[in-house]
Image (cartoon, rainbow, N blue to C red):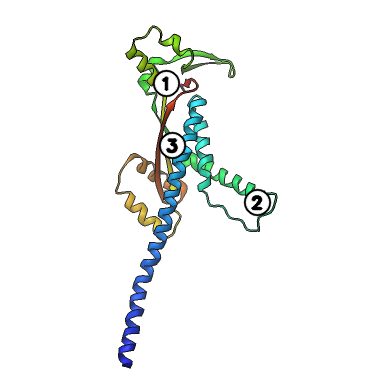
Amino acid sequence: MYLRRKTQVGASAVEATLLLPLALWLGLAALQLLWIFWAQQTLHNTGHYVLRSGQIGHAQESAMQNTLATGMSSVELQWYAEPLDDDHRQQRASAIRASAKSMLHARLASQVIVHSPTDAEQARYREQRFSLPGHEWIDEIAIDHAQARTSTLTPEATQLWLAARQLDIEIWWCLPLRVPLVAPALQSWWQLVDNPAQRFCRMREPLVGYPLWPLVTRRKGPMMSGFRLD
């Protein structure tokens, strides 16, 4: 009886030794996957604001990048070393730090790709105009006086002009994988899926210092200001 009990205890110890690291790894993996899911949903929501900034801001990349960084700053972890005070001083300081980190990360490991207007549409519908705020001549796809512009066009040509006024953007955000033990495994698995966003993030890993997971979203809507050409 004593030997049988001792054998059972020994078997249980061996099983626990084998299963405990696996259970720990699975728990960390679940945490990292939840983090990825949360960041992806944040990017989906932020994409609406990025599109909006492009629609009203002449589709300027800097404005869209700043909006993207501001929206994704909520993904940055924020810690409070002291109890929260009534004037929210710590929250404001933490939000500023998170925004600054997100701004830097956006410059290093994110991209806003404009799919529409295409290069052919830009070449066809561009016109030179004088910008009063900037006191300079600019090239843009104008959106004003739509009825007058389309009055002499055929229905097919009108549809082509309206299509050139659509801003279609794709957003890439490279999320750092910070959970230990799990991050290298997930990043190695994702490298098997060879796509442009993955290659983009892989090239930026030395700059960030963490394995990167590509998050992608796409948004489309009509321009509410002239599409400015660089």
Q: Secondary structure at mark 2?
A: helix
Rendered location of residue 88, percent (x, y): 67, 49
Left or right of 55 in this view: 25: left
Single out the residue that lies furthest toward the right: 87
Give the number of the mark in front: 3 or 1: 1
Q: Residues within 10 Å of mark 1 (few under 14, many from 20)?
A: many
Quarter where residue 84 is shown? bottom right
Q: Which mark is residue 165?
A: 1
Q: Is residue 65 visible?
A: yes
Q: List the residue tagged with mark 3.
A: 111
Rendered location of residue 210, percent (x, y): 44, 51
Single out the residue that lies furthest toward the top: 152
Q: Nearer the viewer, residue 112 or 43?
A: 43
Quarter where residue 19 is shown? bottom left
Q: Nearer the viewer, residue 151 or 140?
A: 151
Q: Kindly report the distance in space between the C-alpha atoms of the residues bearing marks 2 and 3.
A: 31 Å
Q: Secondary structure at mark 1?
A: loop
- Residue shown at 35%/20% (left/top)? 120
Q: List the residue tagged with mark 2.
A: 90
Identify which amino acid the numbered label 1 is placed on: Arg
Q: Is residue 109 visible?
A: no
Sequence-wise, which precedes: disc 2 or disc 3? 2
Q: Residues within 10 Å of mark 2 (few under 14, many from 20)?
A: some
